[in-house]
Amino acid sequence: MLSNSYDLGIFEQTIRSYAEGRLPVAELRGPDFPVLGEHFSPVLAVLAPVYMVWPSPDVLLIVQALLIAVSVVPLTRWAYRVLGSAAAAVVGVSYGLSWGIASAVGFDFHEVAFAVPLLACALTALANDRPRGAVLWALPLVLVKEDLGLTVAVIGVIVACRGQRRIGVSAAVLGVVATLTQMLVFMPAVASTGSYYHFSWLDGSEGGAADFVYRYTVGLITPQAKVSTLILVLAPTLFLALRSPLLWVMLPTLLWRFVSNLVTHWGTFGHYSLVLMPIVFAAFIDALSRRRSIDGSVRRYVMGSAAVSLLLLPHFPFWQMVQTETWRDDPRVAVARSLMKRIPDDAAVQASSQLVPQLTARTEVSLFGYHVSRPDPEWIMVDTWVPHHRRWPLDAVREKAALDYARAHGYETVIDREGFVLLRRSPA
């Protein structure tokens, strides 16, 4: 129970909708909230058949792990061809254990996992003079997330600059048109607000013209978190990736993140750097192959990359795998599951964030105490022992007040055990 409603619960509700033959909605974002109005990720529909057989959040986490694992293959095979087996093994392991991948895997599931193998294959093809293959691998990115059309456009520009103008320009135009159509036409038509929700993070208009200019100039490298993130992205390659034109493919993702006014976009938290990892390591392999033909210093760079990756490893989630407490069973998990069995299938529920993914497969669940949650659920289940740093959206004081309010307005306590409180709405 270390997962969260945002985002594992949201994505499971999305995929469950597809599996039930409905357009995707996420109750956690609001009653009947249309997911395609917030992010354009129809690629998630491919998980519906698997979810129909195994309706569980485990499906999402396993598929994400497989997608990332698959992305290691083309990059390592390319490194093997141009650098040899020893260097390829080190580069492949460094990529697979890189902090951007660790941060993403450590924070539930996200749709951008589908982009990782596509980018790895596209950039491998691009670097090996297969422009048509590069474009064909890149084009599905427009179905993964709305901003990735711009990534496709950059790949198209690189293809065009390498002599394949027709296919390159076509890819670039298709990428830009896809992003603009999704953000300005399709998503506003689906969204309840009638506009692209995330423009509020990017426009800077609330602070006036001065703020807008600042954010798109000096604001791209301030505050320090942005520069720190950029350094960490390039550090595993000893900054050699800067010598490869493939690194330009990172530009759209870095720009929207650093222009955004959402603080979590700037740092190393969560899934935001996941798509950067195959790009920076592809640029690294490309630069190493060029370096080998110049001065044969590949060995020093590869060993340096491994050293940096190892130094970063303890600071990111993969390090949890070597800590004994990671593998200990918390007896409270069994208590929580026994209480959840009392909640019938298809019931309307409000629950604590970390309990939500345990209920998304069989109930209509939303967050307890959140302002967008469907009101008056049949059941409420709350973990009152959640540590302060994992509490959301309510702190302990407001959570207690909300539980007291529910008990005073039609809810009875079914059971209160080891910090878990299960309430049921009293019959009228």
Image (spheres, rainbow, N blue to C red):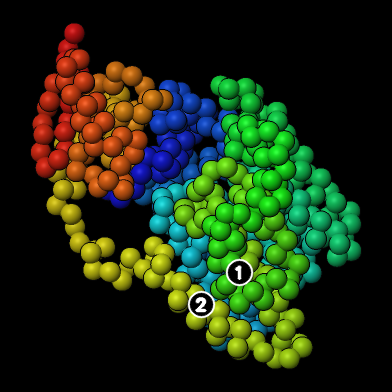
Pointer 2 or 1: first along the chain: 1
* Badge 1 element: helix
Residue 335 position within the rendered picture, expressed as x and y whole percent measured from the top left: 14, 44
Q: Residues within 10 Å of mark 2 (few under 14, many from 20)?
A: some
Residue that sits furthest to the bottom in the current view: 296
Q: Is residue 251 above or below residue 357?
A: below
Q: Is residue 66 visible?
A: no
| Residue bearing the label numbered 2 | 308
- Determine whether, in the image, residue 240 is placed left or right of residue 352: right
Residue 83 position within the rendered picture, expressed as x and y whole percent measured from the top left: 65, 84
Q: How far apart are the two marked residues, 2 and 1, measured between alpha carbons? A: 10 Å
Residue that sits furthest to the top in the current view: 428
Type of amino acid at the residue the image marks with label 1: Leu
- Determine whether, in the image, residue 211 is placed left or right of residue 272: right
Towards the viewer: 298 or 268? 268
* Badge 2 element: helix
- Whether pointer 2 and pointer 1 mark residues with C-beta atoms closer than 8 Å, the reply is no
Residue 62 position within the rendered picture, expressed as x and y whole percent measured from the top left: 41, 55
Q: Which residue corresponds to the image point at 57% horizontal and 72% vertical from the top-left?
A: 235
Residue 137 position within the rendered picture, expressed as x and y whole percent measured from the top left: 69, 56
- Determine whether, in the image, residue 234 is placed left or right of residue 133: left
Q: Which residue corresponds to the image point at 36% horizontal and 29% vertical from the top-left?
A: 370
Q: Which residue corresponds to the image point at 61% horizontal and 84% vertical from the top-left?
A: 301
Number of numbered callouts drawn:
2
- Determine whether, in the image, residue 148 is placed left or right of residue 95: right
Q: Is residue 301 above or below residue 178?
A: below
Q: Which residue corresponds to the image point at 19% horizontal and 48% vertical from the top-left?
A: 333
| Residue bearing the label numbered 1 | 234
